Image: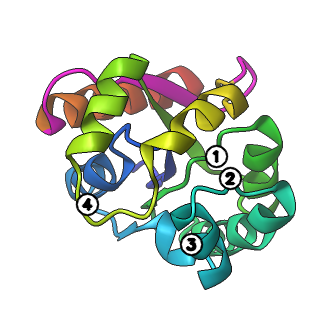
Amino acid sequence: MRTPQVVVVMGVAGTGKTTIGPLLAARLGVPYAEGDDFHPQANIDKMSAGIPLQDADRWPWLDAIGHWAHGRAGLGGVVSSSALKRSYRDRLRAVAPGVVFVHLSGDRKLIEDRMRQRQGHFMPTALLDSQFATLEPLGPDEAGVAVDVSGDPQEITERAVQALAGLSTASA
C-alpha cells in the first residue's frame, strides 16, 4: 500500500488553490488546510491594502504551513500556499521533506478574470503582476507537477490527480 502524499497546491493568486485544494483532498481521501489561514493578521492587512509581502513576512507563514505538512507525513494531506519562489518551497521542504507540489498554472488574462469574479477575498488584482514577477516555476529536481487551470474545477482536479499518479509511478 502506498503512503499518502502531503501535497502543497501552489501558484499565483487566482489560479484556484482554494477551490482545487479541497477537491483534490476529497479525491485523495485526506484533509485539506487553507494556506491563507496560516497568515498572521499583519500579512492579511498588508495584502488587503495592496502591499506585497516581503520575505520576512512570509517566513513565519511558510513555517506554520510546513509544520502542518510535517504533522501529516505518512497520513497525507493537501494544503494551499502560493510557494512562488524556490526559496519558499525549500523552506517548506526543510520542515516537511516529503511534500509534493501541484503548481496550478495558466494564462494571466484567465487568472485575472477569475480574480475579478471572486468576492470577499483580501488579495486585489493589483498584486497579480508582482505575483507573476516573483513566480519561479518548479525546477526539474523538485517533486511536483504543473497543472493547467483552464476548464472547470472538476477538470483541473482530475488533471492534478492524474499528474500526481504519474509522479508516484515515476518515483516508485
Asked which secondary structure carries label 1, the reply is loop
Residue at 26 percent of width and 37 percent of height: 114
Measured in 3D between alpha carbons, the distance from the residue under mark 1 to the one under mark 3, in whole angstroms, is 16 Å
First of labels 2, 3 by sequence position? 3
Q: Position of residue 79 (x, y in %)?
A: 47, 60
* Number of the label disc, if any, that sits on residue 83: 1
First of labels 4, 2 by sequence position? 4
Residue occupied by mark 4 = 29
Residues tagged 1 and 3 counted as in contact (Cβ below 8 A) = no
First of labels 1, 3 by sequence position? 3
Residue occupied by mark 2 = 52
Q: Which residues are magenta?
A: 139-153
- CA neighbours of label 1 inside 10 A, class few (<14), some (14 to 19), many (20+): many
Asked which secondary structure carries label 4, the reply is loop
Residue occupied by mark 3 = 44
Three-letter amino acid code at the position of disc 2: Pro
Q: Tell me, yes or no, if residue 74 can be seen here.
A: no
